[in-house]
Amino acid sequence: MTTPVDTLTIDVQTHADGRARLAPQGELVRGCADALAGALAELPPGVRRVDLDMAGVTFMDTAGLEFLDTLDEHGRRHLVQVSATGWTGQPLRILELAGLDTTDPLRPAREGRKPTGSAPRGGSAVAVERTERLSQLQQEVDQLRTAIVSRPVIDQARGVLMAAHGCTPQQAWDILREASQRSNTKLRTVAAAVTAGAQPGGPAPPEEIRLALRTAVARTAGGPAARATTR
């Protein structure tokens, strides 16, 4: 069974021993928690453990933390074990910034770790962690919100980089972010320069962006850097 919502799908597999494996694919953005709640609600009676394989998640903003809260709440409400493992790329970075366990961010809730600070009565351990580290996340969240607003041009630029350098979607995203940081240029501006440069007769990116792209491609994709988008 697969539950689709916009840029997220959740493949659900259940086993005779009472385990359920959920494999989200795509992006944890607005609506992802509702998608997970729907998938969890459709699990058959007798499920005693729910494991999420997060390897297929390529992007995550703060909605991803709501996604984790939904899983944690399901585990406490139905008295089942839950886990969320296999994190990679940008979502892994968000967990690091939030101070959560990057192997399984729900581990503190299961092991009964007492959080420091205060939180509303009945709040989950994940919610407490999120509240305590909100100030640390703010800068990253602002960048992510900008990226979401700019997603069409960024997605186009990712496609250009994937075609030009044979890289994965995640690698293309990493290239754009690194080039943005190295050139001290907004991510949307870098993406627009890449997209414009890929058009027939289109202008080459400005020198600082071109050099930053070349370095990022060499570091991330591991291939020749001097191609159409970076020449």
Image (cartoon, rainbow, N blue to C red):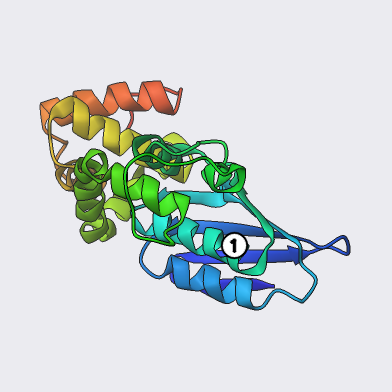
Residue 154 visible, this angle? yes
User: Residue 170 lies in what quarter of the image?
Assistant: top left
Name which residue type carries label 1: Arg
Is the residue 48 above or below the residue 207 in the image?
below
**Residue at 38% over, 21% down:** 218
Question: Residue tagged by mark 1?
Answer: 76
Q: Nearer the viewer, residue 21 or 193?
A: 21
Q: Nearer the viewer, residue 4 or 217?
A: 4
Name, please, the residue furthest toward the right.
16
Residue 167 visible, this angle? no
Q: Quadrant of the C terminus?
A: top left
| x and y, in percent, of residue 11 in the image | 65, 64
**Residue at 36% over, 40% down:** 98
Is the residue 165 above or below the residue 187 in the image?
above
Is the residue 188 above or below the residue 77 in the image?
above
Residue 78 vs residue 66: left or right? right
Residue 60 vs residue 70: left or right? left
| x and y, in percent, of residue 91 in the image | 43, 44
User: Residue 71 lies in what quarter of the image?
Assistant: bottom right
User: Residue 32 lies in what quarter of the image?
Assistant: bottom left
Disc 1 is placed on an element classified as helix
